[in-house]
Image: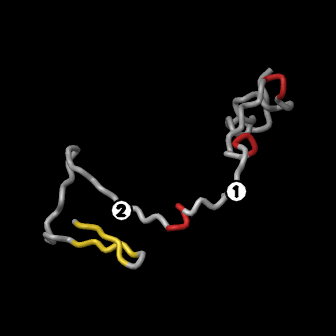
Amino acid sequence: MLCTVHSSQVVVEVCNASTEEVIVKAEAVVAMEVVVPETAFEGKASPSFNMNEVDIGYREPARASERRPGQNGRGSDEEQGRGARRRL
């Protein structure tokens, strides 16, 4: 395949089209066309951010001293299939 960019569109030319299955081996060279807008090279200021202020969705597990009553780290009684009963 030959990939070129014309008028901001990627044109893919297939030199040997066939209906046979194509097997890509580990030794195969794979290329990818990337289109970068010209504005990426104009040097305009982009909004900056502090990585410490970004919420990436990770929360450290609560320490035993910080857990609320009923939070033993093993799930609730219902989650463990014991209903509302507790063993004494």
Q: Is residue 77 left or right of residue 36?
A: right
Task: Determine the residue located farthest toward the top in the rendered image.
Answer: 88
Q: Name the residue under label 2.
A: 33
Count neighbours of disc 1 (C-alpha within 10 A) and say few if under 14, some if 14 to 19, many if 20 or more: few
Q: Which of marks 2 and 1 is nearer the N terminus?
A: 2
Residue topped by disc 1: 47
Q: Distance between the residues labelled 2 and 1?
A: 27 Å
Residue 22, given in percent of the width and then of the height, sits at: 18, 60
Q: Which amino acid does label 2 sit on?
A: Glu
Which dot marks residue 12?
none
Residue occupying image coordinates x 23% and y 44%: 26
Residue 30 placement, left or right of 38 = left
- Tell me what residue is drawn at x 50 percent, y 67 percent: 38
Quadrant in the picture for residue 13? bottom left
Q: Where is residue 69 in the image (x, y as percent from the top left)?
A: 86, 30
Q: Indicate left or right for 58 with 17 as reference.
A: right
Q: In this view, does 88 lie above or below 9?
A: above
- Which quadrant would the C terminus be assigned to in this image? top right
